[in-house]
C-alpha cells in the first residue's frame, strides 16, 4: 500500500484528524470548566439597594409565598417634613420561579400621609449585576375631593445593590 499522499502546503490527513480531535478535546474541557458559570444566576430582592435619587432600601427574606417586608429611606420628599425611615411590604411573583422575577411593594410613609406603590422587575444586566427597574405611583393626601386630579405623581427608579465596604 502506498502512504497517503498530501497536497503540497497542506498537512497530511492523519495530522489534520489529530489536530481536529485535540481542538475538540480542548473545546469540551473548556465547556466543562465554564458550564457552572453559564447557568443563569437568579436576581434576588433580598438585601440593600440604592436608587438614582439616592434613596436606600433594605429588603428582608422573601418567603415561599413570595412575600417580603423591609424599610425605605427616601432621599427626597414632596413635603416639608423631616424624612423618617418607613416600612415597605411587597410580593414577588413566584409562579414559574423565574430568574428575573417581577414584584411590587408599598411604602407606608411614616413622616407624611402619602403612600407609594412600586412595581418592577429584578434583572441581571449585561455585566451580570442585579438591577431593579421600577415604576412608582406616589399618592399624596388632599383635603378636598376636587384636588384628587393632582394628588398622584408617577415616575421610575432604577435600583442597584448597595455593597458593604467589606465585600
Ligand atoms: C412624600 O413625599 O410624601 C413621601 C416620600 C416620597 C418619596 C418618593 S417615592 C418615589 C420616589 N422615589 C424615591 O426614592 N423617593 C421618591
Image (cartoon, rainbow, N blue to C red):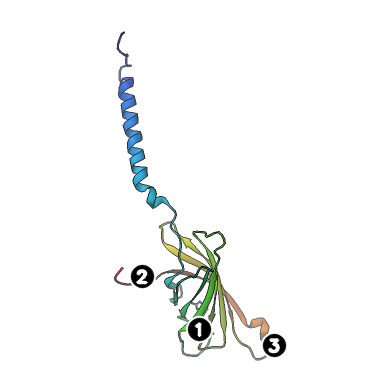
Say left or right for 143 vs 71.
right
Q: Secondary structure at mark 1?
A: loop
Residue 40, x across and y down, in percent? 44, 54
Residue 10 visible from this viewpoint? no
- What whole-number distance in Å separates the C-alpha atoms at marks 3 and 2? 44 Å
Q: Residue furthest top?
A: 1
- What whole-number distance in Å separates the C-alpha atoms at marks 3 and 1? 22 Å
Q: Is the residue at mark 1 in contact range of ligand 1, meaning its CB lies under 8 Å from it?
A: yes
Relative to 141, say whether 100 is above or below. Answer: above
Most foreground residue, 60 or 80: 60
Q: Which residue is mark 3?
A: 145
Residue 99 visible from this viewpoint? yes
- Looking at the image, tell me whether mark 3 or mark 2 is earlier in sequence order: 3
* Residue at the (43%, 52%) spot, across then down: 39
Query: Where, by quadrant of the figure, is residue 23 drawn?
Result: top left
Mark number displayed over residue 77: 1
* Residue at the (65%, 91%) spot, across then down: 143
Relative to 120, say whether 69 is above or below. Answer: below
Q: Which residue is mark 2?
A: 163
Amino acid at each position: 500500500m502506498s502512504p497517503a499522499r498530501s497536497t503540497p502546503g497542506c498537512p497530511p490527513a492523519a495530522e489534520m484528524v489529530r489536530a481536529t480531535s485535540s481542538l475538540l478535546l480542548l473545546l469540551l474541557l473548556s465547556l466543562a470548566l465554564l458550564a457552572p458559570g453559564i447557568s443563569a444566576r437568579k436576581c434576588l430582592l433580598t438585601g440593600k439597594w440604592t436608587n438614582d435619587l439616592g434613596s436606600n432600601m433594605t429588603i428582608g427574606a422573601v418567603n415561599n409565598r413570595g412575600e417580603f417586608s423591609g424599610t425605605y429611606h427616601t432621599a427626597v420628599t414632596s413635603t416639608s417634613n423631616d424624612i423618617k425611615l418607613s416600612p415597605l411590604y411587597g410580593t414577588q411573583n413566584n409562579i414559574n420561579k423565574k430568574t428575573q422575577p417581577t414584584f411590587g411593594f408599598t411604602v407606608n410613609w411614616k413622616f407624611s400621609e402619602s403612600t407609594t406603590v412600586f412595581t418592577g422587575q429584578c434583572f441581571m444586566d449585561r455585566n451580570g449585576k442585579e438591577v431593579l427597574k421600577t415604576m412608582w405611583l406616589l399618592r399624596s393626601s388632599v383635603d378636598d375631593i376636587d384636588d384628587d386630579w393632582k394628588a398622584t405623581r408617577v415616575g421610575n427608579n432604577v435600583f442597584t445593590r448597595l455593597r458593604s465596604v467589606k465585600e
